[in-house]
Amino acid sequence: MAASLHQRPAQSLLSNPSPHSPRFSLSKRPSSLLTRTNLLLLFSLLIILGFLYPYLGISQSLFSNTHFKFQSKWRNYSLEEAVSFVGQNGTVIVCIVSEPYLDFLNNWLISVTRQKHQDKVLVIAEDYNTLYRVNERWPGHAVLIPPVLESHSAHKFGSLGFFNFTARRPRHLLNILELGYSVMYNDVDMVWLKDPFTYLDGNHDVYFMDDVAAVKPLNHSHALPPPGKKGRPYVCSCMIFLRPTSGAKLAMTKWIEELQEQPWTRARKANDQPAFNWALMKIEKQVDMYLLPQSAFPTGGLYFKNKTWVRETKGSHVIIHNNYILGFEKKIKRFRDYGLWLVDDYASESPLGKL
Ligand SMILES: *[C@@H]1O[C@H](CO)[C@@H](O)[C@H](O)[C@H]1NC(C)=O
Ligand SMILES: *[C@@H]1O[C@H](CO)[C@@H](O)[C@H](O)[C@H]1NC(C)=O
Ligand SMILES: *[C@@H]1O[C@H](CO)[C@@H](O)[C@H](O)[C@H]1NC(C)=O
Ligand SMILES: *[C@@H]1O[C@H](CO)[C@@H](O)[C@H](O)[C@H]1NC(C)=O
Ligand SMILES: *[C@@H]1O[C@H](CO)[C@@H](O)[C@H](O)[C@H]1NC(C)=O
């Protein structure tokens, strides 16, 4: 139900352009180009090129060499190095992004920057282009943890790294906890309106928000919500804060186990939220959990659907999640309609600039 946007398989966006698309018709220009003047021009150009060739060759190999060094540097960049580079005050903020969602990343980053927390952001890149594009503009802020999401066959059942792949979100978070850092995870279809860190009351192991759209009283309990119709709660795996405690590590370990116990289906693994909830239920007594206030961390199912509620709770919203909607374009449109698609006008505020 959360329909976490960036988990959505990217193939629909990356599908080949239709063979009838206009750019394929360019080659059908009439051959009158081969007039005498044109031939002459072509000939002179060839001579000039031939003269310049050695110089071009040198600069090209210089270029590809630095290019290669740049790429292999970031290919080798480990999670440990990345976390120690971006971590501040023992805390990192992470998101997991593939290339089609770079605009969403930038949108989220603008809002994080406005709250002055951008320096501790680490982008976990799901493909090499994302790794390079982020680090080119913002060195050290993206890391890639193999196995990479490459082709459909790369994550077939039983393949190398299969288990790591299916449980990659809790595994990345667990690895960061093992390095001794607190970590805040966010989906990038979110926008910060205020600083969420000031809402992390007390010293609990795990903080999260509910994905249920029903309005709760302002003084609602901060315990794990009771199970719903599906026998489990509907806590959102979109925004999680963890302290490096044994309780938080247990929560991630249990989440990984729950993901691995279920048979593989693309749809199920693309949405790891049910497994997160089964895990939380099973370890409720062992782990100190804190449900964040609904008025500050509403699900998109409430924020975008109940104007009365939004009016009544005006000024208390902290993070807005653009969920309860399917489709890339629809999400962008909805953010625009609500003045939350910041990349159109404020890209310069992002550490990545305009992409
Ligand atoms: C990256 O790692 C490979 C193999 O471990 C090594 O050969 C290479 O020199 C490294 N590159 C950089 C830029 O550190
Ligand atoms: C650093 O962390 C401590 C403990 O979590 C917190 O009280 C403090 O406000 C943080 N300082 C900064 C500058 O974020
Ligand atoms: C799986 O993840 C673990 C822990 O991060 C790592 O040590 C291991 O190398 C990974 N294995 C594969 C095949 O990716
Ligand atoms: C919330 O407030 C109402 C009325 O003010 C009270 O009856 C209720 O017990 C409170 N709930 C909690 C969880 O504190
Ligand atoms: C919308 O919010 C109002 C005010 O909080 C609440 O009374 C009402 O029940 C909500 N409507 C729905 C459909 O949940």
Image (spheres, rainbow, N blue to C red):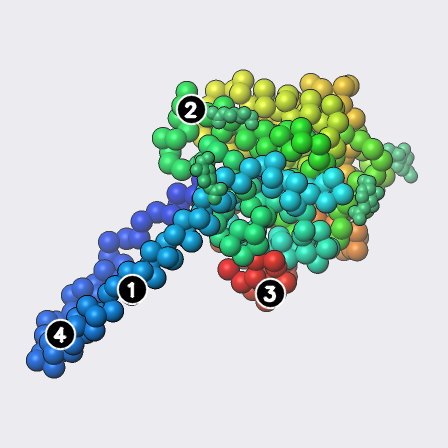
Nearer to the camera, 248 or 299: 248
Q: Is mark 1 within 8 Å of ligand 1?
A: no
Q: CA distance from mark 2 to mark 1?
A: 42 Å
> At numbered mark 2, what does the secondary structure look like: helix, strand or loop?
loop
Q: Amino acid at mark 3?
A: Ser
Front tag of 3 and 4 = 4
Identify the residue position indicated by label 1 in the image: 56
Q: Is mark 4 within 8 Å of ligand 1?
A: no
- Chain-order first, disc 2 or disc 1: 1
Identify the residue position indicated by label 4 in the image: 43
Residue at the location (76% across, 19% down)?
Answer: 286
Q: Judge the density around disc 3: few (<14), some (14-19), many (≥20) Cα neighbours within 10 Å.
A: some
Q: Decide: marks 2, 4 in contact (CB < 8 A)? A: no
Q: Decide: marks 3, 1 in contact (CB < 8 A)? A: no
Residue 51 shows up from this direction:
yes
Q: Amino acid at mark 2?
A: Leu
Is 24 situated left or right of 81 in this image? left
- Chain-order first, disc 3 or disc 2: 2
Residue 234 shows up from this direction:
no
- Chain-order first, disc 4 or disc 1: 4
Residue at the location (37% across, 54% down)?
Answer: 64
Nearer to the camera, 235 or 102: 102
Residue 75: percent from left, percent from top: 47, 41
Residue 161: percent from left, percent from top: 46, 25
Find residue 348 and name its label: 3
Q: Amino acid at mark 4?
A: Phe
- Chain-order first, disc 3 or disc 4: 4
Q: CA distance from mark 3 to mark 2?
A: 41 Å
Which residue is farthest left? 36
Residue 27: percent from left, percent from top: 18, 64
Q: Amino acid at mark 1?
A: Leu
Nearer to the camera, 194 or 291: 194
